[in-house]
Every structure is written in C-alpha cells, then in structure tokens.
Amino acid sequence: MQSKDHIFAAPIAQLGDFCFDQNVAEVFPDMIKRSVPGYSNIISAIGMMTTRFAQPHSQLYDLGCSLGAATQEMRRNLTQTGCAIIAVDNSAAMLERATSHLATFKSEVPVTLTEADICDIEIENASVVVLNFTLQFIAPDKREALLQKIYQGLNPGGVLILSEKFISADDTVNELLIDLYHDFKRANGYSELEVSQKRTALENVLRPDTPEHHKERLARVGFSHVDMWFQCFNFGSMVAIKQATTE
Ligand SMILES: C[S@@+](CC[C@H](N)C(=O)[O-])C[C@H]1O[C@@H](n2cnc3c(N)ncnc32)[C@H](O)[C@@H]1O
Ligand SMILES: O=C(O)C(=O)C[C@]1(C(=O)O)C=C[C@@H](O)C=C1
C-alpha cells in the first residue's frame, strides 16, 4: 500500500528548503506520480530506449535514481548481454528504499546502488545514461561539467535521456504552463496550500532551465543529435545521442 503525500497539507510555520529526506522517500511514488505530468510515460519510454541503445558489455547509469523506477524499467527491457546498471543517489533515505524496492523484482542484471553526489562519480563504458528529473536539482554552475563528464563517459552511439521541469523563454507561455501545471496538481488532489507551500520550498533547490538552454549546452559538450521527445506543460524529456563512429 503506497503512502499518500500529505507533506505540505498543513500550514508549516518554518518552511525550509525541500529535501529528499525520509518523509519524502516514504511518499515518493505517490508524490512523483501526482506531481510530474507524464511521469509514467517517461519511465516506460526509458525502458523502450534501453532496448534500442544498450550495448553488450556496457554500463547503464541512473543518476538521481530515487527509489529506482528508471533502474527497474531499464533492467526489465535490457536484451543485451553483459550489461550492468549503476544507480546513484545522494539521499540515504531514497537508497534504503530503492534497495528493498528493487529486491522485490527478479532479474539477472546486476545493479549497483551507490550513495554519492553524481558530480563526483566516474562515468565510463556507458551506453545509456538517465537523468530523470535530477539535473534541475544540481547547482546551475555544476551542470555543464556534469554533462561533459557524461558525454565523455558514453560510448559512440550511446544516449543520455534528460527529463526536466522547464521554464519557457516566452513569459506569457511560461505563465500559462505554470498555471496549467497547478491545475494538474489540483486535479490530482493537491490543495491550494500544498501547491503553494511546495512551490516555496522548491524555490531555492529546483532551478529549471529553458529547453533552448538545455539544447545549446548539450551541443556544447559534444552531443550530435539532441531534441525533445516528450513534453507536457512545463515538464518534459529530451534525448541526446553521441555520434556513432560509423556516421
Ligand atoms: C525528482 S527525484 C528523481 C526521480 C527519479 N530519477 C525517478 O525517475 O523516479 C531527484 C533525485 O535526485 C537526487 N539528487 C539530487 N541531487 C543529487 C546529487 N547531487 N547527487 C545524487 N543524487 C542527487 C535526490 O536525492 C532525488 O532522489
Ligand atoms: O515543481 C513541483 O512543484 C514539483 O513537485 C516537481 C518535483 C520534481 O520535478 O522533482 C519536485 C519534487 C518531487 O521530486 C516531485 C516533483
């Protein structure tokens, strides 16, 4: 039975910055399902792209894995031999639950769960790298170096799947998408107070970029083929492909 997200349901006098602590980890499946439009579609597509892009005897990375939803979907859809998945998160509470969650599924694919800052880990012999609503929580001045490391650690023909909350470069559209997003949250049972308090708590920790900024930065670090494959309101997912040597 999944616990319901009521974290911001009551007035919080000293509202601090949002963090992925025990309270969040306990309700995370409900929180992310009711807070990210298209989340389940994105997770399914990560599985489909794993089937296409995973290379034999390579590594796949889930960076900011939370409870391992993307890791499990990659594992379920891996048809190549000799692959291993490395799932990284800097929240001990998330990893603790990821360990028990992933253990409930049978699989021959080895998964290494690592508690670390994704800015500090090595990426090597990678065919698939997933940043599923994680980069937005990385300090903006650290994002390019992280993406550069990912690009360099990817094998030719490898893919980065980057899902994010976005801002629109057009103020009018940005306001519309934020309003539609809040309508989405209300339709999913969140109160005005929950929407408002969560928005305040996220202000200093979730720093979204425009799709254009993402595309420019991904091209700058070396990706040859970049575009959005999914968007719903101010949330979406991009693919960035490292040129295969035969091209
Ligand atoms: C919105 S959740 C990601 C959702 C998850 N990828 C999924 O698909 O269900 C963001 C995650 O990134 C993790 N995170 C944030 N900053 C991090 C960092 N610097 N290093 C590692 N993990 C980080 C958080 O602990 C949290 O679990
Ligand atoms: O922007 C918001 O209001 C959100 O709730 C988004 C968001 C996210 O994109 O990661 C923030 C925290 C949780 O991880 C779930 C969803």
Image (cartoon, rainbow, N blue to C red):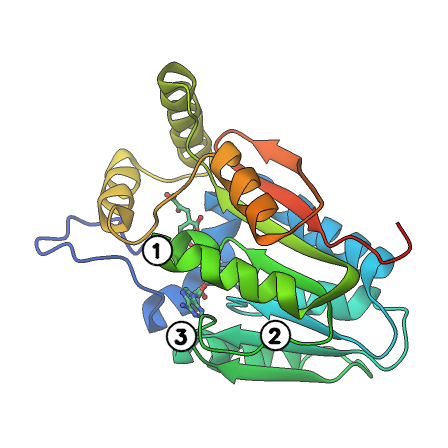
Amino acid type of the residue tagged 1 in the rendering: Asp
Considering every residue shown, the one lying at the far top of the view is 172
Position of residue 88 relative to residue 4, above or below, is below
Give the distance between the C-alpha atoms of the residues marked 2 and 3, in whole angstroms: 19 Å
Residue 91's disc is 3
Give the mark toward the camera: 1 or 3: 1
Disc 2 element: loop
Residue visible at 74% across and 49% down in the picture: 45
**Which of the 4 image quadrants contains residue 153?**
bottom right
Residue pictured at 46% horizontal, 44% vertical: 35
Q: Is mark 3 within 8 Å of ligand 1?
A: yes
Residue that extends furthest to the left in the rendered view of this protein: 13
Where is residue 179? Give x, y as percent.
Answer: 38, 24
- Amino acid carrying mark 2 in the image: Ile
In this figure, which residue is indicated by the disc labeled 2? 123
Q: Secondary structure at mark 1?
A: helix
Q: Quadrant of residue 20?
A: bottom left
Sequence-first disc among 1 and 3: 3
